[in-house]
Image: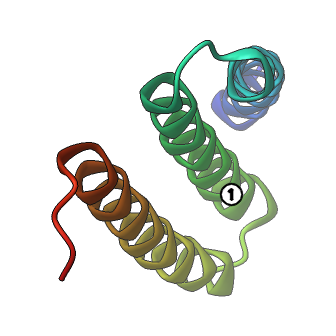
């Protein structure tokens, strides 16, 4: 077994593990008892998606997928920050 095939098996195992993690995280997003749990679950889901995209970028040897990862991370960060801000303002009753 060469190093390349060992890395290929490792990347495929990591993709399967991340897919399982995505299913569990998505379940928590749908079934979460509180809004905070759902928000954290969405954040974990986006982290898992970015990890899968990064692994696919290395596995397929496509550099442009890393750019997609960066854009996805920025959009995810902004969306979670906006939802958290709305959730905090809703709880305190402060309008801006």
Whole-percent x, y for residue 56 in the image:
74, 55
Colouring method of the image = rainbow
Between 11 and 52, which is closer to the camera in this rendering? Answer: 52
- Quarter of the C terminus within the rendering: bottom left
Between 19 and 64, which is closer to the camera in this rendering? Answer: 19
- Counting labels gives 1
Between 4 and 61, which is closer to the camera in this rendering? Answer: 61
- Quarter of the N terminus within the rendering: top right
What residue would you read off at disc 1? 53
| Within-10-Å neighbours for mark 1: few <14, some 14–19, many 20+ | some
Q: Compared to 69, does 16 lie above or below? A: above
Whole-percent x, y for residue 52 in the image:
69, 46
Q: Compared to 55, does 65 lie above or below? A: below
- At a point 81% along the width and 16% down the height, the residue shown is 20
Q: Residue furthest front?
A: 93
Q: Compared to 81, does 31 lie above or below? A: above
Relative to 27, is 28 on the left or the right?
left
- At a point 37% along the width and 66% down the height, the residue shown is 77
- At a point 61% along the width and 39% down the height, the residue shown is 48
- At a point 68% along the width and 57% down the height, the residue shown is 53
Whole-percent x, y for residue 19 in the image:
82, 27
Q: Residue 40's image quarter?
A: top left
Relative to 53, is 34 on the left or the right?
left
Whole-percent x, y for residue 86 in the image:
36, 63
**SS assignment at label 1:** helix
Relative to 79, is 7 on the left or the right?
right
Relative to 74, is 54 on the left or the right?
right
């Amino acid at each position: 077994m060469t190093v390349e095939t060992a890395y290929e098996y490792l990347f495929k195992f990591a993709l399967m593990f991340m897919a399982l993690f995505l299913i569990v995280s998505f379940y928590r997003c749908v079934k979460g008892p509180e809004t905070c749990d759902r928000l954290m679950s969405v954040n974990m889901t986006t982290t898992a998606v970015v990890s899968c995209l990064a692994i696919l970028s290395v596995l397929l040897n496509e550099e442009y997928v890393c750019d997609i990862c960066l854009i996805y991370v920025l959009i995810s960060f902004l969306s979670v920050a906006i939802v958290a801000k709305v959730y905090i303002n809703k709880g305190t009753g402060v309008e801006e």
